[in-house]
């Protein structure tokens, strides 16, 4: 018996030793770390990454010869960005996200089976370059918006198990679900520990949805439909009174829910209503060269430009709403709708959202928290067993951006990273530029 135990112990030590020998270590030296665990900077220090996880900060360990060392030369090390609402489904669009410093994404519906399964697994295992992928399965009560239709409570319960078996982290509730179906979804999701996110469900309302456990509101504008009073019949695009903002904030905070700030998305939509020339301008923008042919066609044929609606007052209200939420401590996360909405190119749109938040009066700390730290908190709360991310600290996923300036002083520096680390891989600026060039070459317009 003792001989058997000794043999097993020896085997375990051999396996453990082999694992240690295979450990991939990368060292960042002379970097100013902006950890985003507080509004602070750790100056001119060393960060060691092992197997894609931050193992230490400020410790100069003796490392094996040949260990890759990245000399920061006084540059700034920052957490990777998170796009918590997109509809990316291709490897080319994953490259666009990564080249823009996005190291985590949440596909919020209509992912292809192969993307939700095979591609997601390959990327998350570090076999294919791209941001860490989370997915939500969108369900609705009718086929109006093209989502999977769930009519009965028993079907709603069944779809939760199917989603979980296929690697989805969330169920996305859409507008036309019945109250019965939503209640069953929320109940079963809680039992199976899968998150519910999404829109205002007309038959339920956001107050009841959040009370039932919905963890995230997918758009700021959902509050127009599910919390704020109906606008006057003779002025359907009138914004709510600012005095109503406090009630909405109290509702969100009472349930510990997260809210996706999509100021850039809503502003981009509003600008093109009844204005085909705006869509043409979107298609002529420099970043549009990275669009897929299908998305170019989709943008050109978008229905927004065919009906004249003035949303300018609501756009202005949303800016005030988001600023007030940020000041009140509502957990905001960044997202949009790229690439399905004209004007939203994957990766580039995330920077558009950060800019829009800053223009709304948020501080750099508030806006950048919504793109890093708070998405990490959201996933930690809603996805059991998910690796920690969003902060530069030991034990966290090494999703890292190296940039030339302090992002808390100049957020625009994030648009041009000197390098990105994701999936335990380091991509320097030349590699990121090559990614963009390859996507543009594949999608060149004849």
Image (cartoon, grey):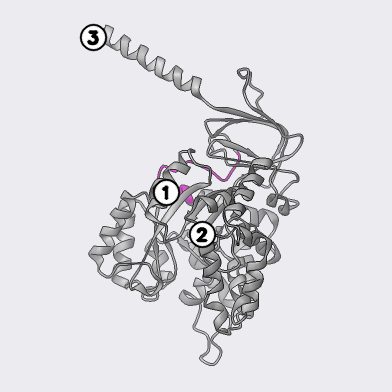
Q: Say whether residue 244 is left or right of residue 358.
A: left
Q: CA distance from mark 2 to mark 3?
A: 57 Å
Circle 3 SS class = loop
Total labels: the figure holds 3
First reached walking from the N terminus: tag 2 or tag 3 = 3
Circle 1 SS class = loop
Q: Which residue is mark 1?
A: 383
Q: Say whether residue 354 is left or right of residue 219.
A: right
Q: Main secondary structure of the magenta part?
A: loop
Which quarter of the rendered picture does the C terminus lie within? bottom right
Residue lying at 51% horizontally and 59% vertically, measured from the top left: 86
Q: Which residues are magenta?
A: 379-392
Q: Is residue 101 visible?
A: no
Q: Which residue is mark 2?
A: 86
First reached walking from the N terminus: tag 1 or tag 3 = 3
- Which label belongs to residue 1? 3
């Amino acid at each position: 018996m003792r001989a058997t135990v000794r043999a097993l112990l020896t085997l375990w030590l051999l396996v453990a030793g082999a694992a240690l020998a295979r450990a991939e270590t990368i060292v960042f030296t002379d970097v100013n770390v902006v950890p985003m665990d507080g509004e602070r900077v750790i100056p001119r220090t060393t960060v060691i990454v092992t197997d894609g996880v931050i193992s230490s900060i400020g410790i100069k360990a003796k490392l094996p010869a040949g260990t890759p060392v990245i000399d920061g030369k006084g540059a700034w090390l920052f957490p990777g960005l998170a796009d918590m609402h997109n509809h990316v489904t291709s490897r080319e669009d994953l490259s666009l996200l990564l080249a823009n410093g996005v190291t985590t994404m949440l596909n919020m519906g209509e992912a292809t089976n192969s993307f939700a399964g095979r591609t997601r697994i390959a990327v998350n295992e570090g076999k294919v370059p791209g941001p860490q992928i989370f997915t939500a399965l969108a369900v609705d009560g009718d086929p109006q918006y093209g989502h999977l239709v769930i009519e009965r409570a028993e079907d709603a319960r069944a779809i939760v198990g199917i989603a979980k078996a296929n690697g989805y982290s969330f169920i996305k509730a859409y507008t036309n679900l019945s109250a019965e179906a939503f209640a069953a979804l929320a109940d079963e999701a809680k039992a199976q520990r899968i998150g519910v996110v999404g829109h205002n469900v007309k038959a339920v309302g956001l107050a009841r949805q959040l009370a039932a456990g919905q963890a995230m509101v997918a758009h700021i504008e959902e509050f127009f439909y599910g919390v704020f009073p109906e606008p006057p019949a003779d002025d359907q695009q009138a914004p709510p009174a600012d005095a109503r903002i406090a009630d909405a904030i109290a509702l969100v905070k009472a349930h510990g829910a997260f809210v996706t700030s999509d100021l850039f998305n809503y502003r981009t939509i509003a600008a093109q209503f009844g204005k085909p020339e705006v869509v043409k301008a979107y298609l002529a923008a420099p970043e549009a060269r990275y669009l897929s042919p299908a998305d170019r066609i989709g943008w050109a044929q978008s229905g927004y430009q065919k009906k004249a609606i003035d949303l300018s007052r609501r756009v202005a209200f949303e800016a005030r709403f988001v600023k007030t939420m940020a000041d009140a401590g509502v957990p905001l996360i960044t997202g949009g709708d790229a690439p399905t909405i004209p004007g939203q190119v994957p990766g580039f749109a995330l920077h558009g959202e950060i800019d829009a938040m800053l223009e709304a009066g948020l501080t750099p700390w508030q806006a950048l928290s919504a793109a890093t730290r708070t998405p990490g908190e959201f996933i930690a709360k809603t996805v059991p067993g998910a690796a920690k991310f969003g902060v530069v600290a030991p034990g966290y996923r090494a999703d890292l951006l190296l940039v030339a300036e302090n992002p808390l002083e100049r957020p625009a520096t994030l648009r041009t990273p000197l390098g990105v680390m994701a999936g335990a891989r380091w991509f320097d600026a030349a590699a990121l530029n090559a990614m963009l060039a390859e996507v543009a070459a594949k999608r060149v317009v004849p």
